[in-house]
Amino acid sequence: MILKPTILLALTLVIAASAFAQEPRIITGVTLVSDAFVQRPVKEEETIFYAYDQKLIEGKLNEYGQKFPENVKLTPAKGGLFILLLSDTTKECFKSLSYTTPKFLIIDLGANNDAKPPKPKDAQHKTSRLFLIQLRPVKGLTGWAVNSAKEERRTVPTKELKGE
C-alpha cells in the first residue's frame, strides 16, 4: 500500500503533536554550568544552541561576553551535550530538563522574581538570560521546547553548532 503525501504529512503532524502533548519525564545527571544576564541586539530572537563539543560552546559564549566556568565539574568530563538557551524572559531560572520522547527535550524554567537584570546598554540592545546546561550525549534530537514558569510551553528556534 502506497501512502499519499498528504497522509504522510498528517501522520507526521500527529506524531509531532503527540510528542508535544505527552507527560514529560525529568532527566537526571544534568549540570547547570552557567546562568548569566547578557546584552544582545533587540532583533535577535530567543534561541537554543547545542553542541557536543565544549570548544564550540565556548566560542558562542565569547560572542556574548561570557567564559566557560573553570570551577564546574562536568559529567562526563569535557563531553556530552551542551545546551545554551538565550531567553528573553529574565525573571525565570533553570529548574530541570525533561523529555517526552527520548529525542524531544524540554527546558523547564521556574519563577525567579528576585532577579535583578541589568538595564540594556542602549536602545539597540536588550537584556537576556543565558543558561548553559550539560548532560550525557543525546544523538538524533528531533525537537525542543521551553516550559515557562507559568506552565506555558513554547517552541524556540534551535541551532546545532558544528565544527569545520
Image: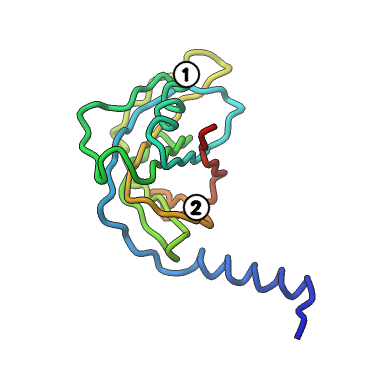
Q: CA distance from mark 2 to mark 1?
A: 28 Å
- Which mark is drawn over residue 120? 1
From the top left corner, tell me how far across and down residue 88 is, in percent: 48, 35
In this view, 53 is above or below 71: below
**Crowding at mark 1 (Cα within 10 Å: few <14, some 14-19, many 20+):** some
Q: Nearer the viewer, residue 73 or 10?
A: 73
Location of residue 128 by image quarter: top left
SS for callout 1: loop
Which of disc 1 and disc 2 is earlier in sequence?
A: 1
Of the 4 image quadrants, the one containing the C terminus is: top right
Q: How many marks?
A: 2
From the top left corner, tell me how far across and down residue 154 is, in percent: 52, 51
User: Label 1 sits on what residue type?
Assistant: Pro
User: Label 2 sits on what residue type?
Assistant: Trp
Which residue: 47% across, 18% down? 120
Direction from residue 43 to residue 49 in the image, left or right: left
In this view, 137 is above or below 93: below
Which residue: 66% across, 73% down? 11
